[in-house]
Amino acid sequence: MTQNAVTFSDDQASAYDAIAELLNAAGIDLEDEALLRPPGGGVTGVMAVIGKAGSGKTLLLAELCKTLTQAGVQVVSGDYEGRKTKDRRTLAVLAPTNKAASVLRLRGVPATTIHRILYTPVYDPDYERIAEWLAGNGERPEIEGLSYEALDRAASFYARNNSIPGALAAAGLRGSDFITGWKRREEPLDIGFIDEASMLDDRQFEDLKEIFPTLVLFGDPAQLAPVNQSGSMVFDGLPEPRKLNLSRVHRQEADNPILDLAHALADPALDFETFEHMVEDKARGDDRIVWGQRVEVDLMARSPVLVWRNATRIRLINAFRTVYGAPDEELLEGEPLICDGIELPLKHRKKRLDLEARGLIKGAQVIYLGPGRKPGFSRLHVIGAEDPQVSAASIVKIEKPDEEEPFIPFAARMGATFLHGAAVTIHKAQGSQWETVQVFAPDLYAAARAGRVEAGQPLWKRLAYVAITRAQERLIWVVRNRLSKPTHPLQVEDLRQAAAPVLTLEEETPE
């Protein structure tokens, strides 16, 4: 193993060396940080790094990414992918959701979503010349209608931020000027690192294997498997030598009461009542754990309450809207939404790809910023997206307790569909993290009483593990069915300020 800026544990070092051997077979020498003769199109295969929260998976991924970059491997991030050259070797770091990708980006890893790599943008030829120039691959272009000063602004922005979309926005270009459409990726890449691999289903896994001859999965076996996977995860079927297990909890995580609670769930003798006593004891001595007597409504707009049952989710959402005085017929600026997919006929497949590639994929967390310029359109901030502000045709559904059909306050004829996001199920929270997380404990008690088992473990323990490990800094274990009153109106100004300069990603309503 090469010398790194960090000190690996024994299990991390063993995993690093095994992955280095895999990459060496792919023509990349990590020890000497050198690119060897590319292999003749052979598939080197799939390897998985498996470990629970705090075992150092992300640290290992980040160090591998850094060493590959130093060796001359080009990171493809979905920001802008230049023209392929003969000797180029590529790496993509992917996550299933925008929120999961943004967690990696905050740690300095240039991650993007799986969708942004499965599909590639079609660029306008003139504006692609600007991108190539900014990336150092061409002469300064002359573009009709774009001033010399505008190009200077783009170059200045790119020098500070290394972002092609941001640089083009600084020059006054919209995203729809630069990207004219999306298509299925035709040419493969070399190496794929997939974070949150426990969320992958078989179809996504097969798609990724078509693109990447070398795949390394990073996953947590204690999380919940995808709902259509019968309790199994894609790395379960790999041969044992291809599964690299990280078991140690690292020194920097050792004084973390949230992880202490998560790892305690591995004890087969632990029952729900004993676990709740542990939570209560932790809360007495550490303000990072809170024994909550009510749901804090101020947090729900950015950090949804995590629940097991849909009925609980719907009740909490309606209580949230009631205390903020939201009228039935419209949304308030700052209300949270969750993308539930895209409703477009097959003939509008191109527009579907465009919306999804811009972050509106199933499960994306979104903040409503107000109506768009056209009827049925919404201005949205996509949490965790690299270019977060989007205007899109929207169908918003608000579910009501004891009613089969949701209420739709406004809608386009077709477009992106949304559910309210003040509360979400623990299944849908996978891959996301928030600074503070509220877990609705009565739902987990109901799961414990039901006695359900998933993949050989009580379901309540899997639910509790996933819910707890969504919290980065603070966990609120809510034990009563009560809701606080808000201390301030819903906020959106911070999103508008943080997003500048932004790309205008207006979609035309399909005819």
Image (spheres, grey):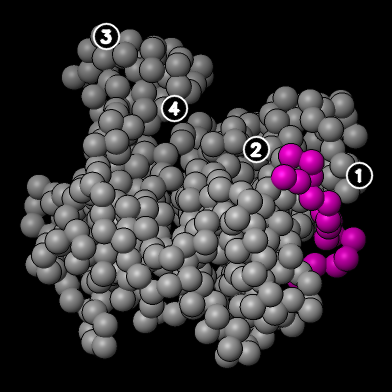
Q: Which amino acid lies under the numbered mark 3 shown in the image of this protein?
A: Tyr
Q: What is the magenta range?
A: 234-255
| Residue hosting label 1 | 10
Q: Nearer the viewer, mark 1 or mark 2?
A: 1
User: Disc 3 vs disc 4: Cβ atoms closer than 8 Å?
Assistant: no
Q: Quadrant of residue 107?
A: top right
| Residue hosting label 4 | 163
Which residue is farthest front? 284
Lower sequence index among marks 3 and 2: 2
Lower sequence index among marks 3 and 1: 1
Per the model, the C-alpha gap separating discs 1 and 4 is: 37 Å
Q: Residue at x 91, y 44 (%)?
A: 10
Q: Nearer the viewer, mark 1 or mark 4?
A: 1
Picture coordinates of residue 293, whole percent (x, y): 43, 65
Per the model, the C-alpha gap separating discs 3 and 2 is: 33 Å
Lower sequence index among marks 4 and 2: 2
